[in-house]
Amino acid sequence: MADDRPRKHPVDEVLPIPKLAMYGFQHVLAFYAGAVVVPILLAGALGLSPEQLVYLINADLFTCGIATIVQSLGFWKIGIRLPIVQGVTFTAVAPMIAIGQGANGGTAALLAIYGATITAGLVMFLLAPYLGRVLRLFPPVVTGTVLTIMGLVLLPNAITDAAGGAAAKGVPGEFGSWKHLAYAGGTLLFILALYRLRRPFLSSIAVLLGLVGGTLVSFALGDTDFDQVGKSDWLGVTTPFHFGTPTFHIGAILAMLLVMMVTVVETVGDSKAVGEIVGKDVSDDDITRALRADGASTFLGGTLNAFPYTCFAQNVGLVRLTGVRSRFVVVAAGVIMMVLGLFPKAAAYVAAIPSDVLGGAAIAMFGMVAVVGIQTLAKADLRQERNALVVAISIGMALVPTTLPAFGDNMPRDLAALLDSGITLGSLTAILLNLVFNVFTRTPPSGPGEIPAAEPSKAA
């Protein structure tokens, strides 16, 4: 007799443990480079110690695991219950660096970042049911401009690392020496060669392999040591507020809220993409649960000394590539991440990556952020003068703090933190100009180069 019981959707299928482990580890490999690069970049820009960097890497991996399990497994009204990996959003790198530098680096920088992260996560969690309604305030002309600005403003940090890092500036003949440029250039060329092979899996971990290869060459030539590995514990557990009580500054919070609005767009797009790949409809309620998971994960990130979290696009591509639709594979990946986050010695190896090697890889990564912004801008009609002005003025304002570091020195602290960040200043400019030109306008403006609106047909 035919079995009349409804068949379980492939998304909800629990695979055998060996397959869960194998497919889950593959997701971890695709995710790992993006996860560890963010704390490395942040530590280099804020002058953190090797011990602090090791702790950040462990905290990030552990929290990524929890966030991934929450999103894919789901509980109550949190989590979309699809094979989606959560990771630290690269969109937050530049604002976090700006926030940290505004707090004069070090531990004070981390506390300011965590205060903004906790606040942004809580706001996103509470407003998740309504965020879809404000997406019209973030059309491609805004999100594309913000992403382009992030890439452009962050590139000078990558170039500084490629030249030897901030520490090399105080050593005569060291900053910008041929040795540092050779390591940076070699790392970048190796990453490009891996992409040139056009193997999807190699492309997904090209940055990770580039960092490993560059570090090994530097070690072989005697320019890198792994002393910190011997000093690190075998086992370590991330504890809440390890660095102290977070601090809350208006400028930092506004910057992080802007980041979260960009991640809303990313999460909506990635959620719908995964839904199409696995053959499952994604409703408005599903999107709300996904955004709640983002908010909860970001709040948890600020509490556990980590960062803001969102869906990882590279793992969306991996789901399409492998055809494995079970969300429990991603749950297994989350468990593996949590286990990796318990071993400081593993993180110490990552922390040993030299600045010049990191700078070579960062040039590619930050440049790609700008390219993604340009691709997004391609969806906006820049033939319309109003859209072109939004982009032009926003980029110009973003470059003001970059070219004039003392721009906000004589302003109140919170306002200075806001204006000292090219990311925040340029993003706010894009949002406000879009409101003026595209939202609070009843009739389309006309002007030189403006494409006139089509007139309604009179034949009826």
Image (spheres, rainbow, N blue to C red):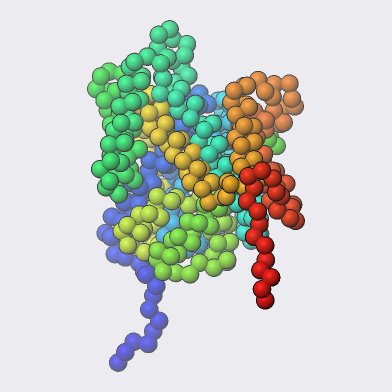
Residue 443 picture quarter: bottom right
**Image quarter of the C terminus:** bottom right
Where 211 sits versus 410, above or below? below
As drawn, is 170 to the left or to the right of 186?
Answer: right
Tell which of 189 and 396 is nearer to you.
Answer: 396
- The image shows a total of numbered marks equal to 0
Residue 422 position in % (x across, y down): 61, 32
Residue 80 position in % (x across, y down): 50, 62
Residue at 34 percent across and 45 percent down: it is: 204
Residue at 70 percent across and 37 percent down: it is: 250
Residue 305 seen by the camera: no
Where 373 sits versus 401, above or below? below
Tell which of 91 and 289 is nearer to you.
Answer: 91
Residue 7 seen by the camera: yes
Residue 242 picture quarter: top right
Residue 50 position in % (x across, y down): 43, 26
Tell which of 9 and 351 is nearer to you.
Answer: 9
Residue at 63 percent across and 27 percent down: it is: 400
Residue at 45 percent across and 35 percent down: it is: 367
